[in-house]
Amino acid sequence: MPISDLNSDLSSLIQARRLMLISKQQAAARDGKLVKTKSMKEYMEEDQALLSGEAQQSRSSARQIHTRVDDLRIKLTSFMNQSHDTVKVPTNPDNGITRQAVVTIEQRKIEIQIKYQMNSPVNGLVVHDKQNAESDRYWFEFENASTFRIIDKVTNKSTTIWGDPHVDVDDIEGSNDGDFKDLKSSNTHTTFMLQDGTRLTFTALDDGIIERVDIFKGNQHIRGLGGASKDFNEQDGYFAQNISYVGKESEISLDYGDIVKAGGDGNDWYDINGKLIWGKPTPSIINHPNTLFLSMTVSQTIAQVTAETSLIRSA
């Protein structure tokens, strides 16, 4: 094999080594480890130094270059076993096959959205805009057409009803802590009874998305439309801007369906017999509403980028 081809092969492997080192540092940084980073200029200078040293060796002995390539291949393979990335390198630099180095790097993009709301006294129910309403103790939010959130302003605990429909309480790991189908009395209505006497009744099939949310407190009523409603669109959906007034609770025709009651720290949900359905048992918290409450949404995007060196064929 010509010396120039071996030098090119070595250059490709060193490029692969550099990509692997950068990927390893990114993975360590994502895990919260302190990582000493280098600039691209520093990486290039280091690569050039490696190439220069090998070039001098190549002029004295082609056999030594073969050994250096084999050593580098072994180091890369060892490095690959310690990471989640992949590397493909030649198994025999002298058998005339085409050689290739491929590095796959995982890239993650994490976005964190934090909302905060100052608490002030509220009399009854208030609609702030088409996606946000509140009572004196609770904040109600349509995140989108199939996602509804209840936030207890006293404890800052939240319960999210999303998808078809799943239930997510924020003090348990994961986003699916239960489903409407866990309750058996009704396939169309599920009512959440809150600790200040507010009632939320969801009209939603146990295997469908939210069609409607009705909030009652005293003689006040807020209606909200979800994505399953035939009348829903982005302009006319979500909360109606006007609060309506109803008569006695016994005169409200909307069926309760399945019933869960809030307890503990605000997002422990019990059935009418006192059995815990969603959440975890926690002590009851009696307090005044916090001066503000926070909500945080975290989204993560994972992508893979593959870098491939030039193909080199032995003479």
Image (tube, rainbow, N blue to C red):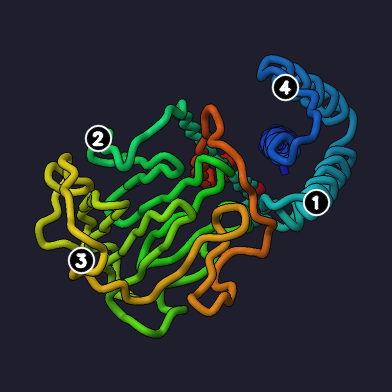
From the image, tell me which residue sits under label 4: 43
Discs 4/3, front = 3
Discs 4/2, front = 2
SS at mark 4 in the image: helix
Residues 245 and 278: in front is: 245
Residue at horizontal 50%, vertical 46%?
152
Position above or below: 46 against 176: above
Residues 159 and 296: in front is: 159
How far, Cα to Cα, is label 1 from label 3? Answer: 64 Å
Q: Amino acid at mark 1?
A: Gln
SS at mark 1 in the image: loop
How far, Cα to Cα, is label 1 from label 2? Answer: 52 Å
Residue at horizontal 73%, vertical 41%?
31
Q: Amino acid at mark 4?
A: Tyr
The answer to whether residue 9 is visible is no
Residue at horizontal 64%, vertical 46%?
101
Q: Earlier in the sequence, mark 3 or mark 2?
A: 2
SS at mark 3 in the image: loop
Q: Amino acid at mark 2?
A: Asp
How far, Cα to Cα, is label 4 from label 2? Answer: 53 Å
Q: Earlier in the sequence, mark 1 or mark 2?
A: 1
Determine the image quadrant of residue 172: bottom right
Q: Earlier in the sequence, mark 4 or mark 2?
A: 4
